[in-house]
Amino acid sequence: MRWGWPCCAVADGEDSVAAAAVAVVRRYEAERAAGRMKAVLSRRRHRLLLQRVLDAPDCITTSEAVVQLCAAIGSGVLPRATPRWWMRRRTGGTWEDLRVCDDATDDFFREKLRMSRRVFMEITEACASHLQRQVTFYREPLQPDQIVAYALYRWETGKSYDNSTSSFGIGRASGVRAVRDVTTALLRVYGDKISWPTGVRKHVVLRAFQDKGFPNCHGAVDCTHIYMDKPANAPSENYFDRKHRFSVIAQVVVDLDLRVLDVFVGYRGSCHDIRVIQLSSLSKRAEEGMLFRGPPVTLPGGVRTNGYILGDNGYPPSEWIVVPYRGINQHPDEERFDNKQKVARGVVERAFERLKGMWRLFPRSHKTNLDTLPQHFTAVCILHNILLDAGIEFDENLLWEVDENGVRWRVDLGIHRPLQPVMMLTSTDAAHVLRNALAQRMKHI
């Protein structure tokens, strides 16, 4: 009797285990049947969807579009509306203000980009094909108008890349690339904006100088220094100029309308103006007879000239550069000539005032790449001529700046006057004869 109860308990336990096993098997079979049913329904839905596509009238075009869409998504061609998490998000700032169209838009463009909105759009449209960015799957690319606007803003403000890019919500690398691409585009599209006058334009230039007392004169030449920080990968003493600043020299020829006719940039600030003009293509073309073409003009005394430009005493007298007499106890004819020559030659300084007053990067010391600086300055000279053609006026207040202490000072144009008249072996008797003949002509004006 004592062993009867445990035997009943064992029997009950075996029944419970068997019942549980049966329940698990049944549940497994039910889930397996449900899985088979889902698979059948899924295949049926796929067949129905495929049949509807095939029955559509334009199923081939639709299929190709779906394939192209899938390929585009897979290769990253479609841009993202928002950037990846590791990329800096673009913000508004100056660029968003420029995009607002209201009554103050044109004034804001003139303040920030030195031109009207119409001129800006013309430049952007002309350069757009050279500024297209590749579409990626990271975020939407910069548009040509924003790229052009940033380059102009950088040249206008003179701010560093780190400070100026924040106003456009872009990174420093994007800013550097924007300035580089806009420079290249301007040189390609508007390269003919800087050229020696020909045709009707040549007659206009010659007539303007003739009215000033200089017949057959094509322009005036001078140099300006573009200041920069101490160069890192070049002998710094070569760029140390007479004002004890680091700079490179830009030689510019302009006409009486302030238009840039020729520009030569890149030589070290320690070079003399004579050396710069001797190394420029301007000198080579003049000596080969390729610069001044057209009928010669006869001056008093039977002196004939094919053409010349005006320069200061930093240049030696030559057959194609007319410089002042200078000196003390001048003859009245010489003094009259020097005054007339100075007034006509002053057009170069006025051109530098407009150019450097508008584009503040170039009268200031700044970090620069010596390899790309000549192209950047040439691009700004192109913009200078574009704005002249568009009739954009110059505000004289741009020639003045106020520092953090409230001190007002005039923009340094970087013109280094010669310490004394230069007498070089390159001076010829023909050069003095030409100058004397022009001085004689001044008597009758």
Image (tube, grey):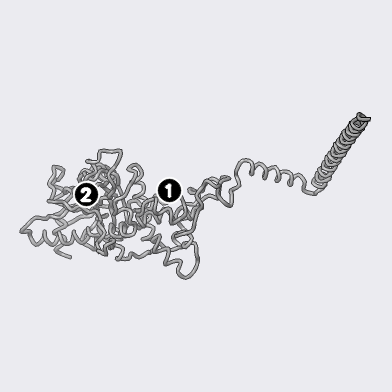
Whether residue 302 can be seen here: no
Of the numbered discs 1 and 2, the one sitting upstream in the chain is 1
Three-letter code, disc 1: Arg
- Label 2: which secondary element: loop
Measured from the top left, where is residue 423 in percent x and y?
12, 46
Answer left or right for 130 relative to 247. Answer: right
Residue occupying image coordinates x 23% and y 59%: 346
Q: Where's the C terminus, which quadrant?
A: bottom left
Three-letter code, disc 2: Trp
Q: Which residue is mark 1?
A: 172
Judge by depth and name the residue closer to the eye, 65 or 213.
65
Residue occupying image coordinates x 83% and y 42%: 38
| Outermost front residue | 2
Q: Which residue is mark 2?
A: 320
Q: Residues within 10 Å of mark 2 (few under 14, many from 20)?
A: many
Above or below residue 432? Residue 339 is below
Answer left or right for 190 relative to 324. Answer: right
Whether residue 243 can be seen here: yes
Judge by depth and name the residue closer to the eye, 339 or 90.
90
Residue occupying image coordinates x 44% and y 46%: 173
